[in-house]
Image (cartoon, rainbow, N blue to C red):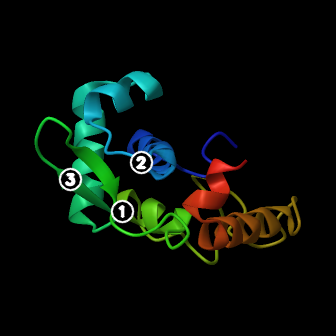
Amino acid sequence: MANLLKLSEATALGLHAMVIIGQQGAPISAAPMAQTLCASEAHVFKVLQQLVRAGLLRSKRGPHGGYVLARPATEIVLMDVYNVFEEPMRKDGCLFSESVCGNVNCVLGSLVEDVRMKVVEHFSTVTLEQAARK
């Protein structure tokens, strides 16, 4: 079940970075973000650049530069960030890395489907602002 959500490190960094940036009142650069996330500055920089290319962040140059949200935190949902780094979250099928039952008579019954639906619903409805309050 370790791969139940199948989130890459880039996705995890992107989700956390977007929430943190949404909480900031000023632009934040890759270096302090990397320190906050205990991650490589180079990796965080790449993640932030992908978010800029996707239109979720804007970058500002100069001594007071850094990254800011391209839209208000109330208008960006977790799924927006997820979709930058991952294939679209499946709305059907098994969440396990490999299905062993072929989706026939699954011993877990509807548990996997219920979890998958809950995850899709959560990512599709929770905004960055809401995630910051959790």
Q: Could you say whether the residue bearing mark 3 is in a helix, strand or loop?
A: strand
Residue 67 pos. (x, y %):
28, 48
Of callouts 2 and 3, which one flags the residue occurring earlier in the amino acid sequence? 2
Residue at point 28% right, 68% down?
Answer: 55
Q: Could you say whether the residue bearing mark 2 is in a helix, strand or loop?
A: helix
Real-space Cα separation, disc 1 to disc 3, in angstroms: 17 Å
Which quarter of the rendered picture does the N terminus lie within?
top right
Residue 92 pos. (x, y %):
64, 77
**Which amino acid lies under the numbered mark 1 shown in the image of this protein?**
Val
Q: Which residue is mark 1?
A: 84
**Residue density around tag 2, few if under 14, some if 14–19, many if 20 or more, within 10 Å:** many
Q: Could you say whether the residue bearing mark 1 is in a helix, strand or loop?
A: helix
**Which amino acid lies under the numbered mark 2 shown in the image of this protein?**
Gly
Task: Work out whether 93 lies above or below 33.
Answer: below
Real-space Cα separation, disc 1 to disc 2, in angstroms: 9 Å
Q: Which residue is mark 2?
A: 14
Real-space Cα separation, disc 2 to disc 3, in angstroms: 15 Å
Q: Return the mark for residue 59.
A: 3
**Which amino acid lies under the numbered mark 3 shown in the image of this protein?**
Ser
**Which tag is nearer the camera, tag 2 or tag 3?**
3
Along the line of sight, the residue nearer the viewer: 106 or 112: 112
**Mark 1 and 2 residues: CB-CB less than 8 Å, in contact?**
yes
Residue 49 pos. (x, y %):
22, 50
**Residue density around tag 3, few if under 14, some if 14–19, many if 20 or more, within 10 Å:** some
